Image (cartoon, grey):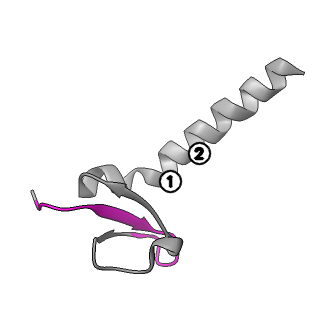
Amino acid sequence: MSEGQWWFCLKHMRVEPDAGCPNKDRMGPYVSEQEASGALQRAAERNKAWDEADQDDD
């Protein structure tokens, strides 16, 4: 496994190493390439949980 940080690029929709697009276009950093590849799925799951929690508060 490679050392360093990994990012998910929102502009190119792919995982990138530390040397990649500007951070404003990326999610991360993550400790592994595999963790970075699941960034969008984790964000969607968290958004859904927050939306459900907001509905419970109403």
Image height of 35 relative to 2, above or below: above
Return the residue nearer the eye: 19 or 34.
Answer: 19
- C-alpha gap between disc 1 and disc 2: 6 Å
Q: Which mark is residue 40?
A: 1
Q: Which residue corresponds to the image point at 74% horizontal and 34% vertical from the top-left? A: 51
Q: Quadrant of residue 6?
A: bottom left
- Percent across and percent down for residue 22 are 45, 79
Residue on which the image places disc 2 = 44
Q: Is residue 11 magenta?
A: yes
Q: Is residue 35 magenta?
A: no
For the stretch drawn in magenta, the main secondary structure is loop
Q: Which mark is residue 3?
A: none
Q: Which residue corresponds to the image point at 39% horizontal and 70% vertical from the top-left? A: 14
Mark 1: give few (<14), some (14-19) or many (20+) Cα within 10 Å: some
Q: Which image quarter is the N terminus in?
A: bottom left
- Cβ atoms under marks 1 and 2 closer than 8 Å: yes
- Which kind of residue does numbered mark 2 sit on? Ala
